[in-house]
Amino acid sequence: MKLTFKALALIFLLCAAPGRGLAMISIENVSTNRAKALGVTLRARTNGEAGVKVWLEYKTEGELKNVTYVEVRIGDGANQIMSAQLRVANPSPGKASVDFSAFPKYLPVSSVMIVVYHGPRGDVGYNFQIKDFLDLDQFR
């Protein structure tokens, strides 16, 4: 079987191209005590017609030094409504924050996950269930 130059070049590119496509994310559901140890805080306030604005702020050091992305998820499992990556802001040196708005009825099934690069074996996702960190009764 003869391989053409284009086929050989494609095979080479596929083998040599760096990527983490097959890597997995191990997920840790974070408790309030663990969040404090990581330097993570959550807060919220009403946001007019947009519902409730939720902020997550974290220190960019230690285990959260190599954050790849931060994602919000509304819903769980087969009932997941949406997920989206959030824009990370740096309000001060050594700190980063993300925010999103949602209607109050969706907050009990909402979470924010900070994904950190953890080497070639995969990433680590730190999952923060909103209901565990905020008093949601104030927004009903």
Image: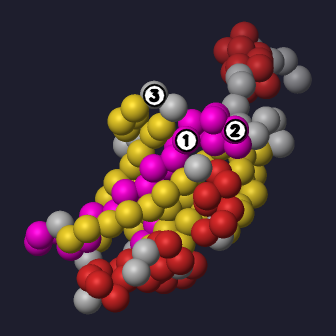
Mark 3 crowd level (few <14, some 14–19, many ≥20, 10 Å Cα): few
Please give the range of residues in magenta: 48-74
Which dot marks residue 93?
A: 3
Identify the residue shown where x is 20% and y is 71%. Answer: 46
Residue 77: image location, x then y, percent: 57, 78
Which quadrant is the N terminus positioned in?
Answer: top right
When the figure is inspected, residue 126 is found, relative to residue 75, above or below; the finding is above
**Which is more N-terminal, label 3 or label 2?**
2
Question: Can residue 68 be seen in this snapshot?
Answer: no
Identify the residue shown where x is 61% and y is 58%. Answer: 36
Which dot marks residue 59?
A: 1
- Structural distance between the alpha carbons of marks 3 and 1: 9 Å
Q: Are marks 1 and 2 in contact (CB under 8 Å)?
A: yes
Q: Is residue 116 left or right of residue 106?
A: right
Callout 1 secondary element? strand
The one nearer the camera, 132 or 112, is 132
Identify the residue shown where x is 29% and y is 84%. Answer: 138
Residue 69: image location, x then y, percent: 53, 43
Image quadrant where residue 67 sits: top right
Q: Which residue is mark 2?
A: 62
Residue 22: image location, x then y, percent: 75, 45
Q: Is residue 63 left or right of residue 92?
A: right
Farthest residue to the right: give it.
1
